[in-house]
Amino acid sequence: MMFLAQEAGWPAALVIVVGIIALVVGGGIGFAIAYALTARKARETKSEAEGLLAKTQAEADVILKEARVTAKEEAIRTRETFDKETSKTREELRERERVIAKREDSLEAKMETLVRKEKMVEASEKRIADTEQTYKIKLADLDQKIAEEKRTLNKIAGLDANQAREMLLARMEGEVQHEAAALVQRYTEQAKEDCDQKGREILAGAIQRLASDFTADVTVATVDIPSDEMKGRIIGREGRNIRAFERVTGVDVIVDDTPGVVVLSSFDPVRREVARRTLAKLITDGRIQPPRIEQVASECRKEVEADINETGKQVALDTGVRGLHPKEVQLLGRLKYRTSYGQSVMQHSIEVAHLAGMLADQLGLDGQLARRAGLLHDIGKAVDHEVQGGHPEIGADLARRYNECEEVIHAIAGHHEPNIQDAMYTTIVSAADAVSASRPGARRETLEKYVQRLEKLEEIARRFEGVEMAYAIQAGREVRVIVNADKVDDDLAIKVCRDIAKAIEAELTYPGEVRVTLIRERRVVEYAR
């Protein structure tokens, strides 16, 4: 522009002024343009910032909502965990309260026993003091009599002091021995009466504390069917289903004219229970065919085995018996399906364990050991249908195999043996067994049949030559025979005992075994008057 002004002939000063004006105007325009660009860029930056802020705000809202949901879920889980722990703690507190209540009852019983013992001790001390006073009086009388006798003898017989002393001592020795024997007999009889009374009190207290509310659970070998048409499906074409069922389960299936019922027969209670569950599932499912029978029987066998193991563990836990061999736990569970006269053997064993423990505690013995022996005393019945012999011998062999202590083994083997004086735990288990078996409602056998069986036992034994008396004892598990010693010698006694046992086997039907004990003795009695 300055060049054009020079070409036009403008003065130099004017050219300079025009140049300056042009520079100013150009700078203003440039500044305006730069400002416009800067403002535009600021607006774009602000818009981007606002968009980024909105996006960030939206993401923050989402994160906040997720955090709130997560916090609520965590609070719910925490509340559920807290409720479970609180419920568990409350249950533990209730259990502890029950344990404390039982301990308080036991302590009260022990305190009552201690009070009775203190009274007995005080009475004994009083009797001893009276006896000492009596002895002192008698000794004073004896001294006086000795002095008088000595003077009399010296006057009459003219004996010296040593001779008189020997004569008096000989006379007094006989009198003192007679009086001592009378005192010993009197105190012995009194001690027996006290022991009998104490034993009755202990046994009565144990029976009262055993609050058993169990109702006998009888194993039923029948299965209900919805209709008689199902019987044909159970039998199958040409009997293939029923043959497969009997082969797989090992039981006899009786399908007769009885409406709505199929009977299962087996001497093994566990096998019978497996068969019952299998048939019930097959009837419910409706698919009764040999492959399906094998599959369901296998499943039911596993269920019964699991039920047996769980039952054995629960029984050990309920009775407080620890450290049992796993096989012993399984045998205890098998007793759930074993009955005796309609009484569950498992429940009977639990009752005997509690009774034996209470009796042992009352007598100052090891209650834990007594409970263990009581729980295992009939364990042989779990396998007595598989192993030959009586259940006490079988149970003792099993206990010996699983490393039980001698007291437990002896109690299992001898809990049906009478008059055992040197084994306290055996005696305790035997008493507890008798109490549990004889309590009202324990066994299902009617009184009439029970009495008839006992009378038949005694009748069979009495009809043999030489037998004077016969008594059925131990609830019919033993018959005691007393023979005439003049008519039956030792060799003949063995034969008579064996013949009685054979006659009982041939003529009577009974559970378990009956022990025949023959007694041959000679008694001589004389009276001194």
Image (cartoon, rainbow, N blue to C red):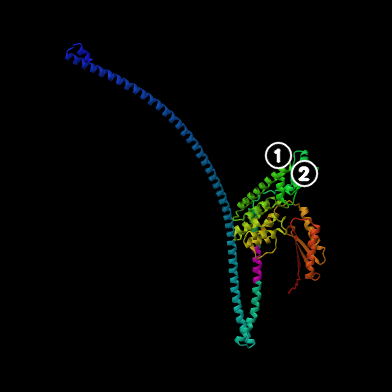
Task: Give amino acid for label 1.
Answer: Asp
Can residue 204 be spotted in the picture? no
Badge 2: how crowded within 10 Å, few (<14), some, or many (20+)?
A: few
> Could you tell me how far apart the alpha carbons at marks 1 and 2 are, in whole angstroms?
18 Å
Q: In the rendered image, which residue does mark 2 sit on?
A: 240
Image vertical order of residue 263 relative to residue 393, above or below: above
Q: Secondary structure at mark 1?
A: helix
Of residues 136 and 233, which is closer to you in this image? Answer: 233
Give how far across and how far down residue 222 sits, in percent.
Answer: 74, 45
Left or right: 296 with respect to 470?
left
Q: Quadrant of the C terminus?
A: bottom right
Q: Residue at x 22, y 13 (%)?
A: 4
Residue lying furthest front in this view?
7
Left or right: 197 with respect to 485?
left
Please tell me whether mark 1 or mark 2 is closer to you in this view: 2
Report if residue 13 lies within the magenta region: no
